[in-house]
Image (spheres, rainbow, N blue to C red):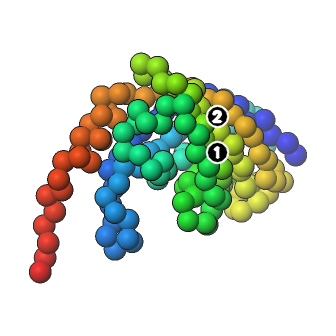
Amino acid sequence: MEIELLPEAGELRSTVFENEHAGILRSVFFSIVIPITPFNFEGETVETSVRLDFIDFGVTDWRLLSDKSFVFPVNPEEGYIDGSMYLGNSHNPADVTRIAFGGFRESSVEVDFDITFDFTYEGPSKLGKPSFTWRVVLNFDPNTLDATLREFLTPSNRRTNR
């Protein structure tokens, strides 16, 4: 069984995150949400999206992503993108191996994605492991992304229990 997954305009976000216990230093991570055009699956109209979380582009300022391309390993190799799409009552892995940004406009950017879904992991296995190359417009709020950058650049006020 084949399925046609057509991306709609998505959203680029960022956050400051750290976890000393897991060895994750204070960093700026990005996330991307890409809605999928509603489609028919098993007699139902499905509305879902692809979530890509904890993306480490190796930059703190979002402006440095403009006109850059990034390659990522697949899960579980270190540096993979935590990606999934909910379908068939399961969160199905989505491995993104390439993200290529075009030039940034005021609050959007065209981005190319190489993505493979693994519906055999938990979900509807009859869909297999389809791969796509998508060109998606990502919208973003420059002020929100700048707020993340300012938060990262502000010294942390952590308390230590000693």
Q: Is residue 137 above or below residue 127?
A: above
* Most foreground residue, 149 or 91: 149
Circle 2 crowding by C-alpha within 10 Å: few under 14, some 14–19, many from 20:
some
For residue 122, what is the image quadrant? Answer: bottom right
Give the tally of numbered discs.
2
Of the numbered discs 2 and 1, the one sitting upstream in the chain is 1
Which element carries disc 2, helix, strand or loop? Answer: strand
**What residue is shown at x 65% (from left), y 39% (from top)?**
113
* Most foreground residue, 93 or 81: 81
**What residue is shown at x 74% (from left), y 55% (from top)?**
119
Residue 80 in the image, given as x and y percentages of width and height: 57, 58
Mark 1 is on which residue type? Arg
**What residue is shown at x 55% (from left), y 55% (from top)?**
82
Label 2 close to label 1 by CB (< 8 Å): yes
Q: What residue is disc 2 on?
A: 112
* Most foreground residue, 64 or 147: 64
Residue 160 in the image, given as x and y percentages of width and height: 14, 72
Q: What residue is disc 1 on?
A: 98
- Could you tell whether 107 is left or right of 21 in the image? right
Q: Is residue 32 above or below residue 79?
A: above
- Could you tell whether 76 is left or right of 19 in the image? right
Q: Quadrant of the C terminus?
A: bottom left
